[in-house]
Amino acid sequence: MTAAPDPGSPAGSASASATGAGLASGPDRAPSEALEPRAWVIWSLAAVTVALSTDNPVYRGLVALVALNVVLAWLPPGRRLRPLIVAMTVAAAFAALINLLAGHTGADVFARVPEGLPLIGGPLTLESLAFGGAIGLGLVAALLSVAPLSLVLEPHDVVDAMPAVLERTGIAVATSLNLVSGFGRTFTEVRDAQRMRGWKPGGLRSWNEVLVPVVLTAIEDSVLLAESMEARAFGAGRRTSYATARFGRREAAVAGTALAAAGIFVGLRVAGVPLDWYPYPTISLPPIQPIAVAACLGLALPALRPPANLERPR
């Protein structure tokens, strides 16, 4: 008979989220201090809508700054923002580089790639670089907008935020979040252990000594998770919880402000108000609408009242 997984392992933490035995208040926060998970989901969806409804770098930059402040204000102890920042930096730089090399439109040429090179051959313009930067900024804003769902909320909070018809989908998302984080931890542990044994990266084949144990561990964790969920009668009925979060006035204010911000951008788009920025053929200042700026700043409402009893790591 297979033993139940350790709660500290990826399988154990995922199974705990699947059974819904945890509180909805998150780590190191009292239930009264935490925002109801549905408010976070609404806020994230609205922020993503604002960030992706325009390619204007001003609005995307505001959304990114606001979302970063919200994440920093609510980031629990033990959660690290560095991996997300590294991923965002790489994604933004890659988007800017691709647009610079593939788009040869613009009046301000600062370098040339030999014409014989496919796809990237031709002039490199400041306009293409600027537009690629705006695309990368949109990726950063979108990633920061959904960051609270993985950095602030617990996996079972994401499940609780799903409607009843999407409960199984929520459980799958929560389980995936746990397994992905566990995959990263396993990779670091295996790599460090192999280095202690004298292993050094010397090429693609040398990484087999790291990737094979990581993949086998991930498969084993998945099997343990499936067995633990089956032992706990997963799918036999609705999930239960020790505590039920209340959608109060603060949650209503956060959700209402976020929905209003998204509604303003959608309304401006439908009304034909210029929101986009097109730097071709020459770079120009992006158009700025005061109501759109106010809508972006309204997304900062969760950061204005962070949890008072949240202990910060020293």
Image: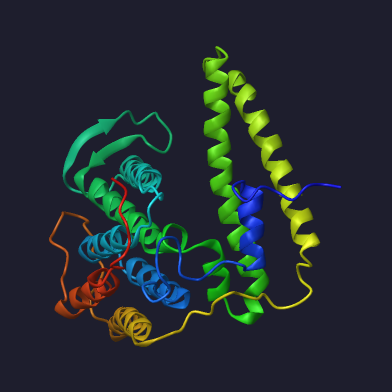
Image quarter (top left, top right, bottom left or bottom right) of the C terminus: top left
Which residue ends up furthest to the right in the rendered image? 1
Provide residue 207's location: percent of width, then percent of height. 59, 23
Q: Image point 21% across, 57% down: which residue?
A: 279
Which residue ends up furthest to the top in the rendered image? 198
Provide residue 18's location: percent of width, then percent of height. 65, 64
Provide residue 8's location: percent of width, then percent of height. 59, 47
> In this orientation, which residue lies closer to the viewer: 243 or 99?
243
Q: Image point 16% across, 69% down: which residue?
A: 287
Say whether residue 123 is left or right of residue 160.
Answer: left
Q: Is residue 284 visible?
A: yes
> In this orientation, which residue lies closer to the viewer: 102 or 254?
254
Q: Say above or below: 308 vs 143.
A: below
Say whether residue 98 is left or right of residue 181.
Answer: left
Q: Image point 38% across, 47% down: which residue?
A: 80
Instruction: Identify the colour scheme used.
Output: rainbow
Quadrant of the image occupied by residue 219: top right
Quadrant of the image occupied by residue 53: bottom left
Task: Give the mark count.
Answer: 0
Q: Image point 40% across, 70% down: which residue?
A: 30
Provide residue 201's location: percent of width, then percent of height. 52, 18
Q: Say above or below: 298 vs 55.
A: below
Q: Is residue 203 visible?
A: no
